[in-house]
Amino acid sequence: MFCPECGSTDKEMVGDICIDCFLKDFQMIEIPKRIEVQICSHCNAKLEEGKWSEENIPEEEIIYRALERNIQIADEVENEIINLEIDQMRGTIANCFVEVVGEVHGTQIEETHDSEVKILKTVCPTCSKLQAGYYEAVIQLRADKREIKSEEYAKADEVVERTLIKQSKSDKLAYCPQIAKLKEGYDYYIGSLKSARKVVEALKEEFGGIIKESPRLISEDKSTGKGLYRIWISIRIPEFEIDDFVRYENKIIQIKGIDKNRVVGEDITTKKKQNIPMKHIEDIELVKKSSEIETTTIISKSPKIIQILDPSDYSAVDLEMKDEFANYNIGDEIKLIKIDDYIYLVN
């Protein structure tokens, strides 16, 4: 066939012209002379197609990705190899060099391009929220019918911090911009609702208790007309603590453990283990605090009876001997708790 551009008749034809004339004006890739990239000056997240994605990416990597994203390769190119190089940095502008080697209709060709990438520093919506102290939920730590102890507050602070550090790996709003220390308890302000719920579950794992959520309308989105809510999450930890004495199903039980699903105790009469589901917590009645345990002296002992002094009036009281007290001797001190005018010996 005859090439209308150069007159050749013995060369491979590409369409209506020969391969040489085709390659003379052929361009393997197209890349803009100037590329602009918006990145967050705080976390290095980048804006792509209207969405902020990834973070903490080195600036050099952002430049290379911007070049790759803007390269368009012609359909005729095969086995292409593209080399990218940052030639010079001038402030926020990177002068870049792009080299392409590839095959077009069986012929290997090479071409080079220059492009510059300008980095536009801005602040992503998430970092803007962080700077403003934004929060989506408030966790209210309360105790039922008692004050929370200082060591419980310290443990709660530790649980909140540990959980948020773990959550921050996948949630940028896993942070606590404020802790309100009120007379009735602490209020933890949490950036994201998702992380707040994780924190509450961790607090319940540590202290037990009941969780309740309460949404509050704070404003209205003018563009959609929908209400904007914040969530208040209350966790109310039990009135009773480890070693306290409670009544449940007409049994007197000494508390041995509390977690998010159950209360574990020991029937002080039978010494049998008791598991009470946390959902029945409202049926558990505190009858004595562990601080009310008293100490007395054994004044007499027989195989079936142990005789002690009632510490309230120093009268002699006979109690049934239990296996766990068999090794005690006359004159030894022993602990007791008095509930409903009945004395129970405790270890």
Image (cartoon, rainbow, N blue to C red):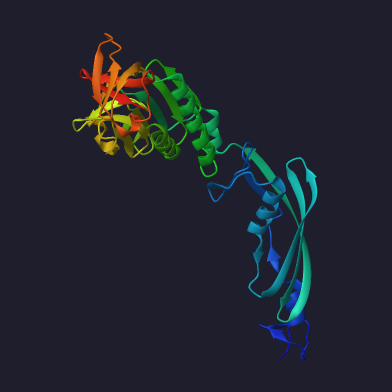
In the rendered view, would you say 151 is above or below 118?
A: above
Identify which residue, 263 or 268, lies in the foreground. Answer: 268
For the point 56% across and 35% down, the residue is: 127
Q: Residue furthest top?
A: 313
| Quarter of the image where one finds residue 99 | bottom right
Q: Residue at x 77, y 77 (%)?
A: 108
Up/down of 141 relative to 67, above or below: above
Q: Is residue 270 left or right of residue 199?
A: left
Q: Residue furthest front?
A: 302
Q: Can you give x and y, in whole percent of width and height, for residue 343 in the image?
A: 25, 21
Counting from the top left corner in percent of width and height, residue 140 is at: 38, 26
The image shows residue 74, relative to residue 235, as above or below, that is below
Q: Nearer the viewer, residue 220 or 111?
A: 220
Residue 335 in the image, given as x and y percentages of width and height: 35, 21
Question: At 25% from the left edge and 11% from the top edge, which residue is drawn?
Answer: 315
297 left or right, relative to 104 = left
* Residue displayed at 73% across by 89% down: 2
Q: Quadrant location of the C terminus?
A: top left
Q: Is residue 198 visible?
A: yes
> So how many labels did they put on this image?
0
